[in-house]
Amino acid sequence: MNKYRLQIWQYDRLWGSFESEGPQAKFAIQDMHHRLPAEQGFQFKLFIARDEKRIIESGPAGIRLLAAEVLYEEMAWPLLIHQPA
């Protein structure tokens, strides 16, 4: 299952990011893209989670996860839109 991050811009100003994962992630990303039309100045950058960085602690009680950071890689729109669900 993939995790996606969509960066949303309007007139070259960053609005924020939308993240989606799970069985309907592709649909959610595509739906968000269609709701914010280019005619109104919206632009997007799409990223897919490719890896994860983890900080762990090892002690007498065992190993414990302290933090995790998802690492994203930018991808082109056609790769997402034309893939089967």
Image: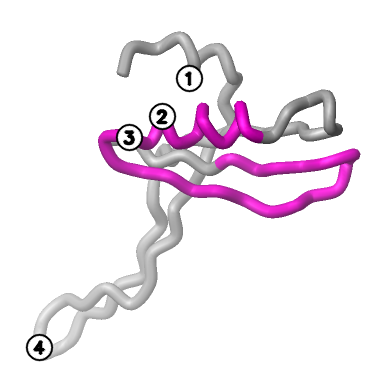
Tell me, yes or no, whether the highlighted magenta stretch contains residue 17: yes
Q: Nearer the viewer, mark 1 or mark 2?
A: 2
**What residue do we see at 36% from left, 43% from top?**
21
Q: Which residue is mark 2?
A: 26
Q: Position of residue 6 (x, y in %)?
A: 58, 40
Q: For the view shown, which residue lies furthest in the right direction?
A: 11
Q: Residues in magenta?
A: 6-35
Q: Callout 1 environment at 10 Å: few (<14), some (14 to 19), or many (20+)?
A: some
Number of the label disc, if any, that sits on residue 80:
1
Q: Amino acid at mark 2?
A: Lys
- Residue 2 in picture, x, y percent from top left: 34, 35
Q: Are marks 1 and 2 in contact (CB under 8 Å)?
A: yes
Real-space CA distance between mark 1 and mark 2, rounded to the nearest whole angstrom = 7 Å
**Residue at image point 73% right, 28% down:** 37
Element type where label 2 sits in the image? helix
Earlier along the polypeptide chain: callout 1 or callout 3? 3
Q: Amino acid at mark 1?
A: Leu
